[in-house]
Image: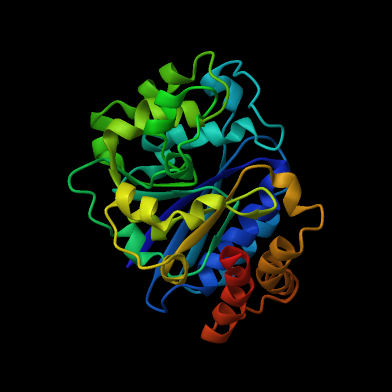
């Protein structure tokens, strides 16, 4: 099995991309091959990414893409911590880099992957061109950008399983560019374009974190089940089965000393640093995962 994964970044987020790549590598099944496509806005040193190519079954390729050239003068994102580079994901189906690739898993870089991604990559899209999960604002019933109707359609922006031939048939790229005109941020584009095309998937594939604590939407297990057609008995069951965590919301909390977030990232960050210095790959163990969940459960149970 070979999994094709695309991420986007600029100079501020390259370390997050490296950590996400490392997380995915150390949690893969031994028979899983990985090819990463990193779309980059800006001109800066990306040489550390090439070090991952020394790992058996792993390939990392990069391509610089000028966001302004492709999308014009986009309005600033509504939050300072997000970059316009996130719009690069809307170009995936038409970039020559993906010629011959049938399916791509797009991932934001502000994620933590807990499990092998084969199940997500091979999920049945029921003839839809995209696979996504609902956003937690649906669960909270909270208006997004002052538009409650939009909230009812909102899906998570942190990942998408993309069937490239079907997206080309849908003229996905041109629709995303059209939806981007005068719009601040990628979320509104996702709402305008993705939702009609998307197969909504089990929320275990991406659970959201937000601000200084675990997202309050986590506690609405009945609503998770209602919106997503699942039957989780409690929130801990959902967390234990989760494949990926998405740290949505203000990214400043990742840097300003939140103990839980620092602990979560330190487990991967220390091993990534060692790999970049020595080339040693430290595999993820069941004990490591139990350690990680041990920090999470006290937060969500509170």
Q: Residue drawn 27% across and 58% down? A: 123
The C terminus lies in quadrant: bottom right
Question: Which image quadrant is residue 73 in?
Answer: top right
- Quarter holding the N terminus is bottom left
In the image shown, does 179 or 237 lie closer to the viewer?
237
65, 215: nearer the viewer: 215
Residue beneath the point at 76% across and 64% down: 259
Colour mode?
Answer: rainbow
Estimate the x, y position of residue 163 in percent, counting from the top left.
29, 44
Residue 201 in view of the camera: no
Task: Tell me if residue 183 comes above or below residue 143 in the rendering.
Answer: above
The answer to whether 24 is drawn above or below residue 202 in the figure is below
**What residue is shown at x 33% (from left), y 28% (from top)?**
172
Give the percent coordinates (x, y) of residue 15.
Answer: 70, 54
Q: Quick check: 208 above or below 197? A: below
Residue 71 is situated, as x and y percent measured from the top left of the image, at 53, 20
Q: How many marks?
A: 0
**Residue at 35% from the left image edge and 33% from the top image edge:** 194
- Left or right: 275 as drawn, with respect to 7: right
Q: Is residue 111 left or right of residue 201?
A: right
Look at the picture and state if 209 lies above or below 137.
below
Where is residue 181 shown, x and y percent of the image?
50, 14
Q: Residue furthest bottom?
A: 287
């Amino acid at each position: 099995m070979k999994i094709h994964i695309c991420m986007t970044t600029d100079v501020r987020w390259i370390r997050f991309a490296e950590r996400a790549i490392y997380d995915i590598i150390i949690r893969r099944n031994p028979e899983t091959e990985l090819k990463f496509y990193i779309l980059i806005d800006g001109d800066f040193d990306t040489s550390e990414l090439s070090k991952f190519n020394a790992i058996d079954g792993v390939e990392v390729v990069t391509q610089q893409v000028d966001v302004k050239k492709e999308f014009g003068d986009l309005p600033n994102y509504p939050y300072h911590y997000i970059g316009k580079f996130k719009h690069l994901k809307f170009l995936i189906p038409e970039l020559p880099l993906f010629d011959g690739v049938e399916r791509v898993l797009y991932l934001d870089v502000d994620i933590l992957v807990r499990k092998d991604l084969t199940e997500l990559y091979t999920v049945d899209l029921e003839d839809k061109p995209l696979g996504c999960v609902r956003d937690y604002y649906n669960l909270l019933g909270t208006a997004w950008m002052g538009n409650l109707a939009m909230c009812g359609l909102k899906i998570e922006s942190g990942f998408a399983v993309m069937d490239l031939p079907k997206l080309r048939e849908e003229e996905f790229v041109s629709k995303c560019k059209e939806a981007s005109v005068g719009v601040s941020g990628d979320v509104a584009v996702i709402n305008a374009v993705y939702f009609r095309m998307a197969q909504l998937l089990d929320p275990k594939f991406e659970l959201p974190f937000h601000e200084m604590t675990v997202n309050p939407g986590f506690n609405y297990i009945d609503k998770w089940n209602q919106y997503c057609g699942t039957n989780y008995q409690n929130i801990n069951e959902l967390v234990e089965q989760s494949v990926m965590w998405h740290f949505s919301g203000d990214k400043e909390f990742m840097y300003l000393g939140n103990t839980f977030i620092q602990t979560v990232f330190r487990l991967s960050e220390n091993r990534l640093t060692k790999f970049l210095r020595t080339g040693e790959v430290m595999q993820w163990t069941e004990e490591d995962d139990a350690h990680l969940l041990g920090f999470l459960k006290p937060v969500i149970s509170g």
